[in-house]
Each structure stands twice: as structure tokens, then as C-alpha cells.
Image: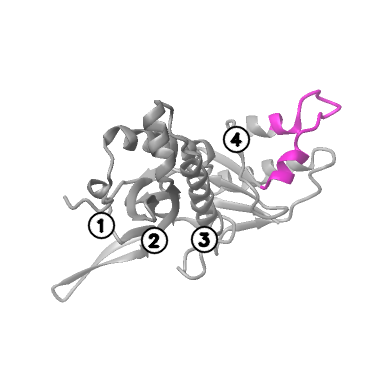
Amino acid sequence: MMDYLSRESAPFGAELWAKIDEAVIGTAKKHLVCRRFLDLYGPLGPGASTVAVDGAAKSEELEEGFGRVTGRRLVELPQLYEDFTLLWRDLEEAERLGLPVDLSAAMAAAQRSAKREDNLILFGNKALGAEGLLNAEGAKVLQRGNWKEGETAYQDIAHGMAYLSSHSMLGRYALVLSPELYLDLQRLQPNVGVLEADRIAKLVGGRVYPAGSFGAGKAALVCAEPQYMDLAVGADLSVGYLETKDFNHCFRILETVALRIKEPAAIVRFE
């Protein structure tokens, strides 16, 4: 297989690569939110450029000796990437003194990569023609009450779950919401003596996720079963070697992913 990550061209060995991989993947796992409730489809391989999205009405039509699949569309697997640089003098000093290599730059890039993936899943990308959970056409939209008062948040989420279950969308429910809404839920309900966040968490099996800073007042309840949505992965998060510039070493974190929304009605947005 072609070494598309160009690791063999790097002027250092497997030991440093292992440390870079551990820092990047470990940091990304801490910050990735949507992968905590979405099933992964793949990895399909770095050469995959598109992936099929099949709807419930998929079928094969046969006519006059030809067959074609209907109810299927192809979506692009875009490349998401972030670059970082390790200074040659830092590597030399670490080797000379037997010190750990400072991989802060790699970890910061991994954090940015995680945010980029979550933003793609939540908001899509207009240039790519990709929809996200918070703007998918065909999702159910419910008016959100004041989640700072009373049992409004609990009632809104229960209403959303009732909608999903009434349409036979049963399984793993997950609530993803902006940080200020999450903070609104960190208050005791005087009548029951528990946090509103804990009451809601019990409704959705503990799957309540504040997802970084992605806009005020945003929340979505989803039935995250793979027949309704998943995350298609071509090349999973990997680190490649770009070049040596001014003796310093330039790297790229990359992945190819696409959110597959097979049934938009499995998403309830609160606005």
C-alpha cells in the first residue's frame, strides 16, 4: 500500500511516531463529542471519496433488462485536516538530555481537529452541500421554553421523546446542546431535590453532551440508531509528515468523514 502519510520520509523513527500518535489520538478522544453517540461506519480506507446514503425506501427497479437502485444518494467524504510543527531544536534537546518531547503543538492541533469534526456533524458545510444535525431539512422542530425556570426543559425533552417514540424511533436517545443551555440545567428542582440535568439524563440513558461553543440556545435530541444516522469514516484520524521547513518538522492531522442522515425525522431540534 502507498504510504500516503509519508512517514517513511520523516528523519526520525518509530518511537517518536508512537508518542505523536498517542498524544494526538488521546487528545482527540477527550474532545470529540458526537462520536460518543453516533455509530461509526467504516473505516472505508483513505482512497474512498464518496459513500452511499440509503433511505428506508431503497429498492431495486428492474425494467427492460436494466436494474437501478432508487432511494440512494452519494455524499462526499471530505478531508478534514489540521497542521502543526515540531521545532528541530526541541527534538535535539529532548534526545540529548533524555527528556520527554514537548508535544503541546500536536495536542492543540488534535483539539482543533476534534472541534472541526463536531462542527461538521452539527452544522454541516454549505460549500460541501452537507447538512448537520442542527440544520438538516426534514428534522422535527419544537419551540423551546425557558430552560432556566421550573420543569420546562424536562417537559420539552419528554415531548421530543414522545414524538420520536410515536414514530417508532426507539433506541439510543442522545441530547446535544450548547454550553449555556447545559449550565441552565445545573440547578436543583425544589420539589424533587435533584438537578434538572440529572432528571433529563435519566430520560436519555445518560447521553447528555455539551458540545463546545457552537451557538447560543442550540439543542437537538436524536435517536442515534444506525438505521437513522451514523458517521461514515474513510481514513480515520491519522498523522502524516508534510515536510522539513527551516529544519523544523511539519505534520498534518487528517481524516475523511461524513455524517449520514438516513432519516431526518429522527432529529428533534429545539429552537
Q: Say which mark, if any, is on residue 148.
A: none
Please tell me which of labels 2 and 3 falls first in the chain: 2
Give the labeled residue for mark 3. Answer: 124
Question: Quick one: label 3, few (<14), some, or many (20+) residues within 10 Å?
Answer: many
Q: From mark 1 to mark 2, how far is it between C-alphas?
A: 11 Å
The answer to whether residue 236 is seen in the rendering is no
The answer to whether the residues at label 2 and label 4 have Cβ atoms under 8 Å apart is no
The mark found on residue 47 in the picture is 1
Task: Check disc 4 and give the amino acid type.
Answer: Val
Residue name at image x 57 percent, y 40 percent: 174
- Foreground disc of the pair 4, 1: 1
> For the residues carrying marks 2 and 3, which lies nearer the camera in this image?
2
Q: Is residue 46 left or right of residue 202?
A: left
In the shown orientation, is residue 217 left or right of residue 249?
Answer: right
Q: Position of residue 67 (x, y in %)?
A: 19, 69
Among numbered discs 1 and 2, the one appearing first in the sequence:
1
In the rendered image, residue 159 lying in the magenta stretch gets the answer: no
The residues bearing labels 3 and 1 have C-alpha atoms spaced at a distance of 22 Å
Compared with 63, 224 (above or below) is: above
- Which of disc 3 and disc 4 is earlier in sequence? 3
> Can you tell which of label 4 and label 3 is closer to the viewer?
3
Question: What range of the chain is rendered magenta?
Answer: 178-199
- As rendered, which of 120 and 26 lies closer to the eye? 26
- Of labels 3 and 1, the one closer to you: 1
Q: How busy is the neighbourhood of tag 2: few (under 14 within 10 Å), some, or many (20 plus)?
A: some
The reply to whether callout 3 and callout 1 are in contact (CB within 8 Å) is no
- Residue with the most extreme top position: 193
| Residue 78: mark in rendering | 2
Disc 4, SS: loop
Residue type at tag 1: Gly
Q: Return the residue nearer the eye: 50 or 213.
A: 213
Residue on which disc 4 sits:
204
